[in-house]
Amino acid sequence: MFYVALRILLYDKVRSFITLLGVVFAVSLIFAQAGIYLGLMETSSVIIDHTPGDIWVTSKNSKNFDFSQPFPDPIYHQVLSDPDIQWAEKLIVAWGVIRQKEGGTEQVEIVGFNPDTGVGGPWDMLEGNARNVKNGNFAIVDESARKRLGNLQIGDYRDVLFHRLQIVGISSGVKSFTTAPIIFTSFNLAQNLITYVGSDSTVFVVAKVAPGKSVDQVIERLQARLKGVDVFDKKTFSAKTRLYWTMETGVGFSFLLTIVISFLVGMLIVGQTIYNSTVEHIKEFGTLKALGASNGDIYKIILSQAFINAFAGYLISLCITIISVKIYEMNYMVMAVKAWLNILVLGLTLIMCFSAAFISIRKIKKIDPAILFRG
Amino acid sequence: MKHAIVTENLSKVYSDGRNEVTAVAGVDLVLNAGEVVGLFGPSGSGKTTLLSMLGCILSPTSGSYRLYGKEVVNLDETKLPAVRKKLISLIFQGFNLFPALTAYENVMLGLQIKGITGPAADKRTRDLFAEVGLSDRMDFLPRDLSGGQKQRVAVARALASDSPVILADEPTGNLDFANGRNVMEILRKLARERRKCVIVATHDNRIEDIFDRILFMEDGRIVKEVNDIAKLKLMRELTSSSI
């Protein structure tokens, strides 16, 4: 029956092409939307995910990584004093302005980290070393922001919040969800640059729990001891940040809406063409029934048509998506297409096409035998 | 001797809730293996409905229908395909061949439905094409075949299962005289040589000499049965010459 389905599809070339085009259009759009969304979510928590440590201490009711408020320095010492904490580091994340070479300004996200440990700093350096930001007005920019900041090179100078900084390194893979370039400096310099943080405050404390100790128990203990802050494990804070951008900005809903619309459009196109093909072949299907074929035999033909459309459409869409991912990468944008997403989209495509075939199956079920006898 | 088909008071009434239309009203039939029976009658006389019921693709409203001794009227809808698969072959005026499949593949599909596959199916298909005289057209698509050739493919498909009962609805309706005659000769040969019970619903007077018996239908009933076809033909000729 699979062979019959294939032959019908190959025979109705124009119709099959339109169906396939519909599937490719819908599936590519689903892939693109899901991939871009996941890419954006990855970038929104990229620093949290790449920073070692198990625990993040943030200001009270902090909603995400990008908009946390400073809290007093003693909190850091209180965290460090917990017997089950192996190490703790302070981290500043705040907003600033960089003056371009030609005079314009750009908003930047400044990350101040301890260059001795590298916790919270860049993890993949294209040029220079993360330690180079120590003891001076030094900064590291990401390659994705290089062009935007006037083709920055190592050794170049830029004014950040009215302080002249020298570029000492180029990092890779650090992109902000907000699209503002990220600039890494030493923790001490960040304290000087961002006046509202000041010399006796920090924005985050990142801590590592000693091996063999329970992260949950330490979090519970710290949360009870520390006033005016929240304590999260790394995974929760990362998810909280992603959820913030997904829900609060409406990004998640708009991506979901496009995915749903793509799914429905695809279903409509496949459904309509398979239905038309079924109606066109209704006498032949009826004849098969009259010859002794069960409804199941004929459903196999219809479902095989749906399967062939789904699988071929999926494969073409996957190729388009792989090319799109490369194009995105070349433009320093992130489109995240993971193995699980491939499987999920394949599943969605099959559901889309099989659901579309359902109307045709109903039609087959209700074939009026009288049609067979109408010449 | 076990009869091929026996119906008693077989009826079909169509109803839309308010109105009822009786398509077939109390038909009694006894048909045997090896005979070719013609079902004649004007449009709307109930031929097609009767043929549909005999083909187990339409359930009667009342009456009895025994196919090779087995009562099939009250059979569950899910069991009817198996009955059709084993005992009945159908030939239609419109051929109903899959346009996307070659003549060979159309017949193979018929065999596949009957559960015959592989080399056995291939040999049987080739034999059938030889039998209907289309061995050189097996790889043609239906669109590349003439009406007569298409009908012969449909006959080959119907014969593929080797079912003991062959039901044909206007098999010569879309064919010229020579092709129509050719198809009917094949059916008669099958009845004689393979003891098939062949029932043909038709308007075509030109082929009436093929039949062993002719049943005339009107208003859903069998109103006349003619066993002496030669006499019937002679009467027709006399009537038309006197006019």
Image: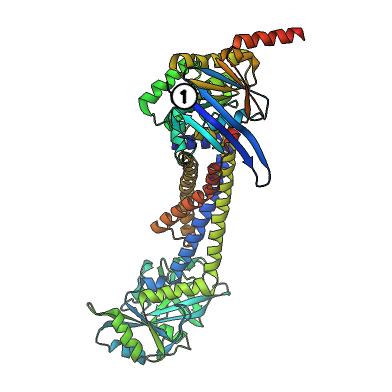
Quadrant where the image shows the N terminus of chain A: top left
Q: Which residue is mark 1?
A: B4
The crowding category of the residue bearing disc 1, from other C-alpha atoms within 10 Å (few below 14, some 14 to 19, many at least 20), is many
Give the structural element (helix, strand or loop) at label 1.
loop
Tell me residue A337's x, y (percent). Answer: 43, 58
Tell me residue B185's x, y (percent). Answer: 54, 13
The front one of B219 and A207 is B219
Tell me residue A31's x, y (percent). Answer: 49, 56
Name the amino acid, label 1. Answer: Ala
Kindly tell me whether residue A112 is visible in this rendering: yes
Q: Residue at x 43, y 86 (%)?
A: A59
Please identify the quarter of the rendering in which residue A242 is found. bottom left
Give above or below for B153 relative to B24.
Answer: above
Kindly tell me whether residue A180 is visible in this rendering: no
Give above or below for A363 relative to B32.
Answer: below
Left or right: B228, with A199 as reference point:
right
The front one of A206 and A283 is A283
